[in-house]
Image: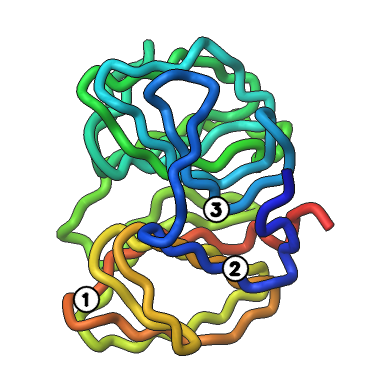
Amino acid sequence: MRLNADFTQRALVRFSESDWIASPMPGVDRKMLDRIGDEVARATTIVRYAPGSAFSAHTHDGGEEYLVLDGTFCDEHGAFPAGTYVRNPPTSSHTPSAPDGATILVKLHQFDPADRTQVRVDLDPAQDAQPLHRDAVEEVRVAHWAPGTTVDLDAPGGIELFVIDGGFEESGDALSLWDWLRLPVGTRSSVTAGPDGARVWIKSGHLAHAPA
């Protein structure tokens, strides 16, 4: 499967306009944002776990990065409530489940193979800018923009934005809750927060290292 696989192009997926697709595991459904590959893939996905659902044990050869959007996501390493950001590096393994249900934004197979950095950060809604992770390749952060605020985006290495709360407008497109936007390497643009402001997960720099 190839979905939004041309990283030189702008890509936008609205949560309300995309379909849930059943995974191989009962009770686990997905909204695919970008993907190269089949069941083992370089992918960005919103995954919904029904209460009591689980995924079988597996190893992340290419790493796993996720943000818990709703409910509590669990594995043998702990319970991760909404607002938790986690990076599990290549060679890490787990058995994920959601006894009470959960929804996560997850990115797979996008790490440097030598990366062994484990990260867990609890998002702080009181912070206007919160760093989550930074290395030689990328920066991940959360930004909180007041209503009507205009922010310039200078993204020499490309950028992804995911709406956690509120919404914003970019290039004439209005984005709201759980919408996703990817802008290619070399982008210069601006966003304007909506009337309720915006809280946005932002990942930048990494697209300069994306597959051709």
Give the numbered dot on residue 197: 1
Mark 3 to mark 1: distance in Å? 24 Å
157 versus 151 height, above or below: above
Decide: few, some or many residues near mark 2? Use Cα within 10 Å; few <14, some 14-19, many ≥20: some
| Local SS, label 1 | strand
Q: Earlier in the sequence, mark 1 or mark 2?
A: 2
Q: Is residue 176 above or below residue 40?
A: below
The residue that label 3 is drawn on is 33
Q: What kind of residue is marked 2?
A: Ala
In the rendering, at what x and y percent does residue 68 appear?
A: 33, 39
- Dot 3 and dot 2 residues touching (CB under 8 Å): yes
Residue at disc 2, secondary structure? strand
Q: Residue at x 33, y 38 (%)?
A: 103
Cα distance in 3D space between marks 1 and 2: 22 Å
**Of the residues tagged 1 and 2, which is closer to the observer?**
2
Above or below residue 181? Residue 164 is above
> Mark 1 belongs to which amino acid?
Gly
